Image: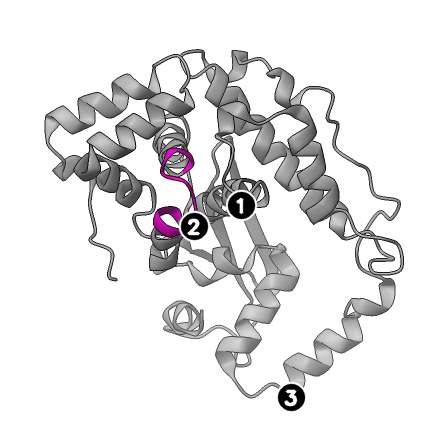
Amino acid sequence: MLKQSINISNIDEKLHSQLLLENNSTGYSSNTLDENSQTGDVLFDQKLEMATEGLEPYYLDHLKTRLSSGNALVISKYILSMKLEVNLSDNHRRSIITSLKLLSEFLKNKKSFRDMTHEDVIFYLDSCCRKPESVDSHHKWISTYNYRLICFIRFFKWLYSPDIEPSKRQKPPVVQNLPTLKRKEKSAYKPSDLWTTEDDILYLKYCKNKRDRCFHALAIETSCRPHEILNLKIKDIVFKYSNEKQARFQKQITNKSAEWTYKVKGVAFDGGVEAGTNRRLVKLL
């Protein structure tokens, strides 16, 4: 079933006003959620479609078919509320929907989120995230455990206090006294897992694909995330040429809280800098 794309700006004013009103309401009871989901089928579907807009179709399908209508509606309202509070990325939306869906499914969809207890959350984290030493000797499971926990804490704080400013919301009893865990290892990777300078030079020497060579060089010099490099555009790059005829560029990436400027020094392609090098380099990106 194909998901119809719905933009909040194209929805009638009545629906948009109701969403804003619900985001400022004082929590949701399981009875109210069931009534809303049963008596307002059109509105229910629109909310789910708005919450999953731009994501893979199976996210919408899972909300409709794998969860109770009440819990699916709460997840949708939470996503829509988060869109009003922060600049919510698609990856963050995927993670939120997945985490909350797994929690609801773990409890066999027999409990609404409002009815879940402190013990339910602990039971899920210990059963689904924690792994024995024999299975995960490097304790990589702790990263998943902490991420799920942080997601749940933020969600339940909103669920019980949606009308309060996000920074002032208090932890409800369901997620109180649940600290994140610390890993024994400083890093999940061993020194032998990382490339050495010699490895990088060897790769750049024999890699025939200019695009891959450019990507690898930028990743080494800037430590940018892959999507940050792949999303580079001509307007993002400012070239400065040194006396040694080597290209330099600055890339500003806007974050929710700050801006960073990455500088790459001494990067030379095709034997030096010539007319049109800047455009050739961008094409390689």
Percent across and percent down for residue 234 are 35, 60
Q: Residues within 10 Å of mark 3 (few under 14, many from 20)?
A: few
Magenta stretch, residue numbers: 63-71
**Which residue in the protein does label 3 denote?**
206
Q: Quadrant of residue 225?
A: bottom right
Residue 65 lies in the magenta-colored region: yes
Q: In this figure, which residue is indicated by the disc labeled 2?
A: 66
Looking at the image, which is closer to me, 1 or 250?
1
Mark identifier at residue 142? none
Q: Is residue 259 left or right of residue 174?
A: left
Residue for point 85% across, 53% down: 132
Q: CA distance from mark 3 to mark 1?
A: 49 Å
Report the disc number at residue 105.
1
Q: Nearer the viewer, residue 31 or 11?
A: 31
Image point (16%, 36%), residue name: 9
Asked if one can make out residue 267 in the rendered structure from this viewpoint, the answer is no
Q: Magenta region, mostly helix, strand or loop?
A: helix
Q: Earlier in the sequence, mark 3 or mark 1?
A: 1
- Binning the other alpha carbons within 10 Å of mark 2 as few (below 14), some (14 to 19) or many (20 upward) gives some
